[in-house]
């Protein structure tokens, strides 16, 4: 196992090469352009005004429709840096909302999602992977794939909510 000093030296060396910073900036630029594309092309959704980043682990933003807002729910689009995976989550504004909807849902009701209910999760009600091991070489195709997945997830979520609320 490497010591903290050795890890810092490797970190410093990698930063001096400069690839990490450029790749990270590329990811943030992609997320920003994806968010702007979704905002411009989908008038029925509202998006958070910024991309949130948690170290080099995840970048994410929120998506809300009128129906979700009324129920204190939101969709979160996550990008996981270590696996290059895009996930969508159904989440609530607080723990009580998440608990309420987790209790109302059943695995059978989620069969369209190919998703899972996240019992005792602090942040999500349902999680669904849109893209695994994302290929950024064709960013337009990637944006379309993610957008299609998000819109289908929202549509399925809203249809499901009409049955349980």
Image: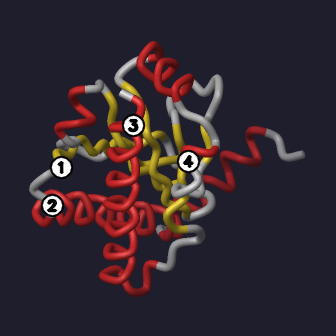
Residue 93 shows up from this direction: yes
Identify the element where label 4 is drawn: helix
Q: CA distance from mark 4 to mark 1?
A: 22 Å
Which residue lies at the image location 36% right of the left edge and 43% below the top edge?
Answer: 75
Disc nearer the start of the sequence (2/3): 2
Q: Which residue sits at x=41%, y=19%?
A: 97
The residue where tag 4 is placed is 110
According to the image, label 3 marks what residue?
163
Q: CA distance from mark 4 to mark 3?
A: 12 Å
User: Dot 3, how many residues are within 10 Å of its Cα: few (below 14), some (14-19), or many (20+)?
Assistant: few
Q: Quadrant of the C terminus?
A: top left
Estimate how packed mark 1 is, as few (under 14), some (14 to 19) or many (20 or more) residues with alpha carbons within 10 Å: some
Report which residue position mark 1 lands on. 45
Counting residues from the start of the chain, the first of labels 4 and 1 encountered is 1
SS label for mark 1: loop
Could you say which is closer to the camera, residue 116 or residue 156? 156
Q: Which mark is residue 42?
A: 2
Residue at the far top: name it: 96
Above or below residue 131? Residue 96 is above
**SS under mark 2:** loop
Q: Nearer the viewer, mark 4 or mark 1?
A: 4
> Can you tell which of label 4 and label 3 is closer to the viewer?
3
On screen, residue 145 versus residue 50, left or right, reads right
Residues at marks 1 and 2 touching, judged by CB atoms closer than 8 Å: yes
Task: For label 4, count other residues whose C-alpha is less than 10 Å away and answer few (under 14), some (14-19) or many (20+).
Answer: some
Image position, residue 8 (x, y; %): 66, 46
Q: Along the horizontal axis of the image, is 82 left or right of 67?
A: right
């Amino acid at each position: 196992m490497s010591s903290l000093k050795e890890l810092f030296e490797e970190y410093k060396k990698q930063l001096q090469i400069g690839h990490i910073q450029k790749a990270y900036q590329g990811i943030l630029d992609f997320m920003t352009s994806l968010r702007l594309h979704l905002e411009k092309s989908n008038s029925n959704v509202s998006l958070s005004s910024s991309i949130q980043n948690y170290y080099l682990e995840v970048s994410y933003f929120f998506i809300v429709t009128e129906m979700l807002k009324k129920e204190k729910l939101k969709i979160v689009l996550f990008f996981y840096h270590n696996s290059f995976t895009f996930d969508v989550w159904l989440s609530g504004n607080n723990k009580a909302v998440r608990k309420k909807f987790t209790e109302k849902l059943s695995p059978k009701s989620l069969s369209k999602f190919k998703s899972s209910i996240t019992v005792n999760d602090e942040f999500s009600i349902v999680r669904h992977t849109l893209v695994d091991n994302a290929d950024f070489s064709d960013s337009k195709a990637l944006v379309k794939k993610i957008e299609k997945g998000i819109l289908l997830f929202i549509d399925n979520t809203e249809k499901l909510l009409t049955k349980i609320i």
